[in-house]
Image (cartoon, rainbow, N blue to C red):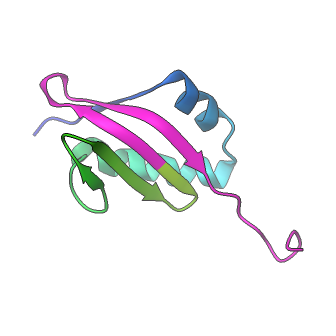
Amino acid sequence: MSTYAISYSDRAARRKAGLSAPQLASLDDLEKRLSIDPFGPPAFGSRKNGWSITFAYGLVFYDVADRHAVINAIDLVALCVLTRASAP
């Protein structure tokens, strides 16, 4: 079974670069699972409309180029995590 490479659009790459260490660790775990099976749970979507998947601190929108075994991360949305100290 081959694994899929993951390619980030410029926008998604900029957002990935701005993630905190815990966010990046969570995304790294997601990338490992996604590279093995970009269509399996917890991914949501279809080959026609694209896919989305959540990780502990955000959401990734992507499509898959099956012929080339590449996942194209189109956008990445990071969620703000409030702690007791930062809560209003």
* Residue 59 placement, left or right of 1: right
Asked if the stretch drawn in magenta spans residue 68, the answer is yes
**Quadrant of res 5:** top left
Q: Residue furthest left?
A: 1
Seen from the viewer's position, the closer of residues 12 and 50 is 50
Q: Image point 44% across, 52% down: which residue? A: 29
Q: Quadrant of the C terminus?
A: bottom right
Q: Is residue 81 above or below residue 27?
A: below
* Residue 13 placement, left or right of 34: right
Q: Residue furthest bottom?
A: 84
Seen from the viewer's position, the closer of residues 47 and 58 is 47
Residue 6 image point, x, y percent: 36, 31
Asked if the stretch drawn in magenta spans residue 9, the answer is no
Q: Quadrant of the N terminus?
A: top left
Q: Image point 54% across, 32% down: which residue? A: 12
Q: Residue furthest front?
A: 49
Q: Image point 31% across, 62% down: which residue? A: 42
Residue 39 image point, x, y percent: 21, 50
Residue 75 image point, x, y percent: 49, 37
Total residue callouts: 0
Seen from the viewer's position, the closer of residues 21 and 64 is 64
**Quadrant of res 3:** top left
Q: Is residue 64 above or below residue 87?
A: above
Give, as a single range, the part of the protein colored magenta. 60-88
Seen from the viewer's position, the closer of residues 43 and 19 is 43
Residue 73 image point, x, y percent: 41, 34
